[in-house]
Image: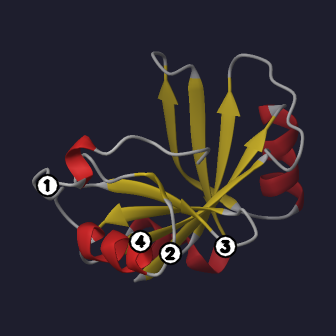
Amino acid sequence: MRYLHTMVRVKDLDASLHFYCDLLGLVNVHRMDSEKGRFSLIFLAAPEDVERAKEDKAPLVELTYNWDPEEYTGGRNFGHLAYRVNNIYETCQRLQDGGVIINRPPRDGHMAFVRSPDGISIELLQEGEHLAPQEPWASMENTGEW
């Protein structure tokens, strides 16, 4: 398992970039804008991690900017922790066997979400190519929030 990123939702992208980049000193290493999803993702690295981050070898901070205004309450501005795993189905099975609810099952063989005992959302991403869809995951519905 490898730690990937921490996601934080931001209300004012310019103010957030000013804070994280200009003042704190993080470096923008990747940006993705989704017209269809109406959001932007900006991945930031510490200055000494920039080269490693470009090679997908350093943890990042992901700023998520939703284009439609939203008030974030109850800690919703903190999104999730993300980990890449060797086999998403085996990881989810181990968690489920341990009593963890799979909030967003890995129906696509690529991504799943669970929550910690304190309600922190954890994203699990398959290392490399997506795995072929597999039961019971392929037909499992979402449970709760993720």
- Per the image, label 4 sits on a secondary structure element best described as helix
Judge depth for marks 2 and 1 and give the one in front: 2
Q: Is residue 24 visible?
A: yes
Query: Which residue is disc 2 drawn over?
Result: 99
Cα–Cα span, label 2 and label 1: 21 Å
Judge depth for marks 4 and 3 and give the one in front: 4
Q: Quadrant of residue 87?
A: bottom left
Q: Nearer the viewer, residue 124 or 47?
A: 124
Please say if 106 is above or below 65. Answer: below
Query: Sequence-wise, which precedes: disc 2 or disc 1?
Result: 2
Please say if 86 is above or below 20. Answer: below
Query: Sequence-wise, which precedes: disc 4 or disc 3?
Result: 3
**Residue kind at label 3, given as amino acid type:** Pro
**Residue kind at label 2, given as amino acid type:** Gly
Dot 2 and dot 1 residues touching (CB under 8 Å)? no
Query: Sequence-wise, which precedes: disc 1 or disc 3?
Result: 3
**Residue kind at label 4, given as amino acid type:** Gln
Query: Which residue is disc 4 drawn over?
Result: 96
Q: Quadrant of residue 2?
A: bottom left
Q: Quadrant of residue 10?
A: top right
The image shows residue 130 at horizontal and vertical percentages of: 18, 55
The image shows residue 103 at horizontal and vertical percentages of: 50, 52
